[in-house]
Every structure is written in C-alpha cells, then in structure tokens.
Amino acid sequence: MTALEASGTGKGPVVDAKASAAGPHPVTPATDNAKKDTRRKWLEIAIFVGPALLIFLTFVVFPMVMAARYSLYKWDSRQPFELAEFIGFDNYTRALIGGTDPETQEIFWKAYAEPFWNAVGNNVQIIALSMLIQLPVAMLIALVLNRKFPGRGPTRLIIFAPYVLAEVTAGLMWLMLLDPRGPVTEWVQAIGLPTPPQGWLEDPTWGFWTFFFIVSWKYIGLAIILFLAGLAGVPEELQEAASIDGASWWQVQWRINIPLIGPTVRVWAFLSIIGSIQLFDMAWVLNKGGSTGQYSTIATLMVDIGTQRNDGGYASALAIIMFIFSMTAAIIYLTLVMRRDTAGSRKGA
Amino acid sequence: MANMRRAGAAVAFATSAALLLAACSSDDGDTTPEGTDSPDTEETSENSEPVTLTWWHNSVAGDNGQNDLGDYWQKMADDFTAQNPNVTIEIEQIQNEDLQRTRIPLALQSGDAPDLFQAWGGGELATQVESGYLMDLSETLADDIERLGGGVAPWQYDGSTYGLPFQFGVEGIWYRESLFEEAGITEEPTTMAELGEAVQALKDADITPIAVGAADGWPAAHWWYNFALRACPQDVISTAGTTFDFSDPCWVEAGEQLEEFLGTDPFQDQFISTVAQTGATSSAGLVATGEAAMELMGHWNVFVYEGFTDGTEEGIQALQDDLGWFPMPATDGGAGDPTAALGGGDGFSCYVDAPPECAEFLSFIMSDENQAGAAEAAGILPVAPAAAEAVTNPVLVELSQVAGNAEYVQLWLDTSFGTNVGGAMNDGIVNIFAGTGNAQDVVDLMTAAALTQ
C-alpha cells in the first residue's frame, strides 16, 4: 500500500512535466491525453511495484496463508500433507489452555500450554526489560558519546561492533566464554564470587538473565546509534541558548535533548518490541532456548516443535499466534504511541 | 514456519542441484556416457540401460580431515560400478543431523529423493513407510535379510523389510582403567550398588566419577532409557513404540530410579551445561583427557575419544589401552531382564521409485565380505554374523559379545518412539536432570505427545 502510494505520488510531477512540455506541439484533445497519461501511469506503477509485489505475495503472503491452513490440521511434517487430519482449532486451544478435553487437559497443559506460556512470558519479560534497562543505559551512553572527546570515533565503533557481528558468531563466542570450564567461570571464581550452580546459560534461574545480558550486549549498539543520530539533529542553538541561560549539562540533556529525540526513541522502542517478539537466532544458537526452556521464545518453541518434533500443525499454529501477537503489538503501538510521529505522513497521503 | 520450510527447501534444492552439476562435470572415469540422466529402468532390468543411483550417507570428514567410512563407501561405489558399467553412483556426504532432520525429510516430501539413503530404523522408518516413501525389500533381498538375522528388526515394519543396517551396537559405560586403579576400584560394577560404591571411591580420590553431556539432551536421556530397560518387562518396552501405552508403572519407576541416582551426585559439575562431543570440556573430552572416569555411551564413542588424542598411533594406542567398558549394571528388582541391552545402528533404505539397481547395490555393500571390509577399514560394528571376526578393537569385541549374549536388544527409545514422543521424552528427562521436573512428568509429556499424533 505504502509502496504503491509512494511510487504513485512520486511519479505525478514527472508526468505533469511531460504534459506541459508537450505544450508547443499541436494540441491534441485533452481527454485523449489524460487517458494516455493514466495508462502510462499505471504501466509505470506495474513495472515498479510488480516485481516487489510478486515477491511479497510469493514469499510472505502465500506462506502465511499456508501456515494458517496447516495450523488447522494434525500433520506430521515429514509426511505428505494428504495424510493430515483436519482438527479445527485444536492446535490453538492446546497451546493456549491445554486443549478442551477435560480428561487430557492436565497433561496437555503440562506438555504444551506450560512451555508455550513460559515462552510468551520470556518474550514479554525481554520487552519489559529492554524498556527498563536497555533504554536508559543506551540513552546515557548516547548522551556521553554525543560530547566531543578524544577517541570518540573508536569508542563508538566498539560499542556498535556487537550489533554488526553475525548472530551465530556472537552466540558461539559466548558459548565458549561461558563454558563450565571457560574463562568467565574461571575469572569469576578467581575473584571469589559464586557462579551459577548449573552453568551461566543452563541454570534454570540464572539462564534467562545471562541470556538477557547477551541480547542486550548484542542490540544496545543499535539503540545508541539511533539515539546519536537523533541527537545530531537537535539544533545546537537550542543547547547554546539553554547554556547561556545558565542550564547545567544535565539540564540541557533532560529538558532539551531527550524530549527532542522523542520520535527516535519511540521508533527504537517499536523496533525493539517487534524484535523481542520474534527473537530467535541467539536463543537457538545458545542451546535451542535452553535445555529446560529457561530462555525459550515463541519462535524457538515453534522451530523446535516444527523441525525437531515434526508436529507441523502445532508449529504452524504457534507461527500464527506469534504473527497475531506482533501484528497486535504493532497496531496498538502505532495508534497509541506513535500517532504524533506518523501524523505528518498520514496527512500527506 | 511455512516460509522457513520453503526457504529451507529452496536452499536444499539449490545445494543439491549444484552438487549434482559438480558430480556430473567430474565423472569418475567410468564408461557411462556423461550428462545423460538415466530414464526409469523399472520395466527392464537389462544391464545395458544406463542407470544413475544417488546415495546420501552421513560419513563426513572429521576435524582432522579423515573420513575412513566415507572413503570406504566411495570404494564400494567404485567396485560396484566396475562390475556394472551401466551404473553411475553419485554420493553426497551430509552431516548427520542435517541429513536426518532436514535433507531426507524434505527430499522425500518433494518427491525428488535420493535413491539410497541413510536410515536409522524404528519410529522414523515407520513414518516413512506409512507415507509410502520406501521400497519394500522383503522379497528382493530375502536371502540377505535371513543372513543378517535379528539385527534387521528395527528396519522392518508390519512384517516387511524397508532397509538393511550395516552396523549395530549396544551401549554401556566407558571408563578409564587408570582412574579406577587410582581410586582403588578393582572390579567392574555389575549392580547399581557397586556402581554407587565406585562413584564414592572416585569422589574420595578427587576424581569426577561420571561425565554426561546433558546440554545435548539425549546423552542424559540414555540414563533413563537404561533404568526403563531394567524396570519394564520386555513386552511393555518393545511394544511401546507401536502402542504408545505408557500406563505401566515401570515408566514412572525408571524416573524415580534416575532421581535416586542423581541424588548421589555422580556427575560432573554443571552437567546441564555440558555438551557431549564438542571440545575438551564436553563429556567425551573429559573422559578422553582423564578428567572424568566414566561415561554412558554407544559403541561409536571409541572414535569420539580418539578425536581428542594427538592423532598419532602411540597417542591412540595409549588411550585404547586405558579404555575399559562394562554393560549397564543391574538394578534392584524391576521386571526387566538384567542382561537386556540398549542399542542402535545405521542402515540404508531405497526410495520407493528407485531403480532396482538400488537393492542390488545395497545387497552388494551388505555382503559378508564387504561388511568385514568395512569393519577393517572404518572400524564399524558389522551386522553380518560372518563378519564379526573382522572386529579387532578389544573393547568393541567385548561390546559385541555383550550384545550377542543379551536376552534382547532394545532400540534406542527415542529412535523407537519417533521424533515427537521421543523428543517429549528427552525433554522430560532433561527436566529431571535440571531439577525442574519429576518422574511422573516424563510419562505425562510422552502420553500427551502420543495423543497428538
């Protein structure tokens, strides 16, 4: 929709220019010209949007429709789909409430609903912790890095490096560092501090926090870079004016810089929420969401069920649930929080 | 999920297409005309029609670049094509988990499957048979099936045979003799009580008694399998893979025995964070480097341990000399036979639409002579009884004897139950190890998974 609009409006002036350039030539009936223009406009739209639309339909919309269909079946994903059995919304009720059959509800709750809600809980916790911990830390670092000091370039580079690193590479690196006999364990023990009894990542209680630390380390660079870009756009006159009026550095940040990069922060939060719901790579590389699911997410649970357990129907249902979650979060966030930021563009359309 | 599968299929297709092209362009110098994709030769088994067999197996080169079994399979293909000049065999070596979990299932679903491919038997084979993917070999290879004997059972379904195993071994406890000596243990434990004493003696001598790679799930689960094997009557455990009936109290009992054993703290620190085979801090690495005394593992582990030596003849020999092996000790009570053993193997199945040469070639590699050759060249544990003498490694010889004397050999429970129930079972068992689940939970998870399939 947006792509279509963009190309449509973007081309408008070009067509007009051509039309006016045709002025000196013998006048043709206006209606004919307009028709030609419309046809030409649509042809251009088709050429520009067509390939992207085709790819979008084939690789995004079609698989989504198929997943929605699979989710209504009992289907061993190693078997041909013809052998699948239609079971309505059973896969969904299994995940959400442990099925509707009172006889099996208890064990289904234990086997399916519990891991599902555990994963949802992990996703939600990561979203909340990102806002509570990542946001202030990233903001603080961005404000500091926004000042001029020697070595600012290299410092920025180092902070941004984890974000650029491939997820699998970073995951393997942390696995080595956090190995039961690895360097981190040894260092921490050397200074006399206790280490998690069952290991940094696999300990049922510590595992989640280690995971959150790694994810923050990986993604905080993005927040900082975005905030720095936002800060660069804050007019210097404002800061100067405030300083002249006697505002301290902190007051300048608190009253001018932070409020003025509000839109950037809100965009970052949006990306962070969607990213947190879909979080997969790092959790999977570290150990498929943890041996007891201590840092599993809906996505790792879905891939585990789909590829390791071959329950194609149930995994598809999880995919659809995740899609609904992301979609709902996106819509709510866009309408409630980012209304101001997108107001301009919506008016423009 | 769907788009991931699709992307996976596309990648798989692109990879295999590239490999096929590569294979075509570098012909191994036999007389088959190049680049001609053979037509289906099902109607005529005349030896003149050119036939191409594609073969996927899991023997990939290790860290040190050696691939004894892969080289042997190449030799088998060369020997067979020398005798049958009309046949071309295209081999693809694929890492085990990729092969089993991704490549084969996708290839079978796409209808463009390799002719001959690795098969692990049990529940997975049953799924493939039900889907109509596998060639029934019962009649064409009747002689081979009879010659190979009971080892073929996991590759049979509903009275028909859909694959042949080239190796089969049982599991037991590997240990370092020098560490046992250091702790003053003179006899291999034969009961759980004796194993408990050995664990205590090792702890007293400041040696980690047992290593387990619980981060991988299955190595921890195998402890539970063995307790189940000792707790459950043979008919209960051997039919569970088809009935999925876990109502017998022996299944809960297995978990309780595991809980009790875990209570004696026999494993290394942070066993939940330890993997099985990768790196010196893995469970195999701990045993190979002499940090831990014992490990419960399958017959393949002798090669995993060797991977941690410096690779020299002397280094390997020194390790071999210090490696001991004993079967899982008997438990107190329990309806299971104390001599029963858990085991598993590797085999090959033919795709349902494969040319008849597939079965011929399978029969060729399974001959007594070639089975013995594989044992000599790559150290496999052959299934053909006549090839047993080719096994020279003393531990593997002992292991074969235990398998031969076992009242019965039960296929790994996860393989037997299939990925869904097997996966649920392993998850439940890991929860016991981590202290977040109990014996009843394992049975509940298995029962729930069975009800959904």
Image (cartoon, coloured by chain):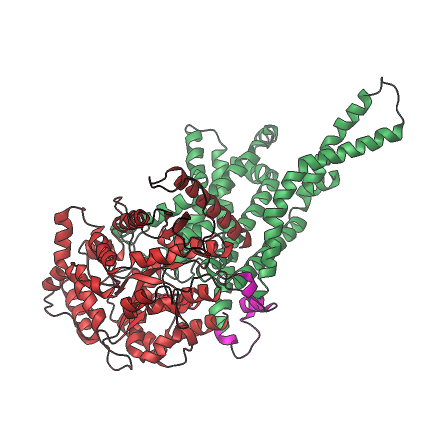
x and y percentages locating residue A306 in the rendered image: 49, 59
Q: How many numbered marks, from 0 up?
A: 0
Residue located 19% across and 75% down the image: B191
User: Residue B25 versus residue A279: which sits nearer the camera?
Assistant: B25
User: Residue A316 versus residue A66: which sits nearer the camera?
Assistant: A66
Q: Is residue B290 magenta?
A: no
x and y percentages locating residue B151 in the rendered image: 29, 68
Which colour denotes chain B? red
Based on the displayed image, in which of its 4 quarters is residue A317 positioned? bottom right
User: Residue B210 versus residue B221: which sits nearer the camera?
Assistant: B221
Residue located 48% across and 74% down the image: A107
Q: Which residues are magenta?
A: A78-107
x and y percentages locating residue A127 in the rendered image: 52, 53
Which colour denotes chain A? green
Instruction: Determine whether, in the image, residue A35 is placed left or right of residue B85.
Output: right
User: Residue B29 versus residue A305: which sits nearer the camera?
Assistant: B29
> Is residue A345 depicted above or below A240 in this figure?
below
Whether residue A329 is visible here, answered yes or no, is no
Q: Is residue A94 magenta?
A: yes
x and y percentages locating residue B276 in the rendered image: 29, 57
Residue located 40% across and 37% down the image: B25
Residue located 72% across and 39% down the image: A5
Whether residue B359 is visible here, answered yes or no, is yes
